[in-house]
């Protein structure tokens, strides 16, 4: 998924974008509903990991965050800003998070499934 050798803190990551930190905190709280995660912070992204990385924040934009997750199947939604297929059966999804209220049951379902991928459990 995402990789960098530079380690930073969450505070460093949001230093110039403190107004976006509540979006991150809401996304992290959603992710943590499905089990304990390791938070890996690099210069340009934050990833959430169980056994493997399965979700994260890949960018900060003027109007919100670019968030993503990994699934083992294709789904379609107008909420995705990007879908990347990694053959044979992996898909990385990106969506814009502009308001914590967007973290609804649909997104929670995707993140719950992504957490299963992160645990590397059989489906």
Image (cartoon, rainbow, N blue to C red):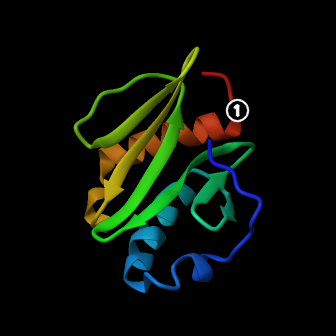
The residue nearer to you, when weighing 99 against 57, is: 57
Number of marks: 1
Q: Residue at x 30, y 28 (%)?
A: 76
Disc 1 crowd, CA 10 A, few/some/many (<14, 14-19, 20+):
few
The image quarter containing residue 9 is: bottom right
The image quarter containing residue 79 is: top left
* 71 relative to 56, above or below: above
* 113 relative to 108, above or below: above
Q: Residue at x 33, y 67 (%)?
A: 64
* 75 relative to 1, above or below: above
**Disc 1 marks which residue?**
120
Rendering coords of residue 51 (x, y %): 75, 43
The image quarter containing residue 120 is: top right
Q: Residue at x 37, y 83 (%)?
A: 19
The residue nearer to you, when weighing 91 against 114, is: 91
The residue nearer to you, when weighing 56 against 16, is: 16
Q: Going by the image, does 73 lie left or right of 13? A: left
Element carrying mark 1: loop
Rendering coords of residue 109 (x, y %): 40, 41
Q: Going by the image, does 99 lie left or right of 27? A: left
Rendering coords of residue 39 (x, y %): 67, 63
In the picture, which quadrant includes the C terminus? top right
Q: Residue at x 36, y 46 (%)?
A: 107
Q: In the displayed image of the protein, which residue is found farthest to the left?
A: 78
């Amino acid at each position: 998924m995402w990789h960098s050798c530079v380690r930073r803190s969450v505070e460093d990551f949001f230093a110039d974008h403190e107004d976006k930190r509540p979006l991150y905190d809401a996304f992290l709280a959603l992710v943590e509903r499905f089990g304990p995660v390791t938070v890996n912070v690099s210069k340009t992204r934050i990833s959430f990991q169980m056994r493997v990385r399965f979700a994260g924040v890949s960018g900060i934009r003027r109007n919100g965050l670019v968030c993503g997750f990994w699934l083992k199947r294709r789904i379609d939604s107008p909420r995705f800003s990007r879908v990347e297929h990694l053959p044979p059966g992996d898909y990385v999804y990106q969506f814009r998070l502009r308001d914590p209220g967007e973290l609804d049951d649909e997104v929670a379902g995707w993140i719950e499934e992504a957490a299963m991928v992160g645990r590397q459990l059989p489906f």
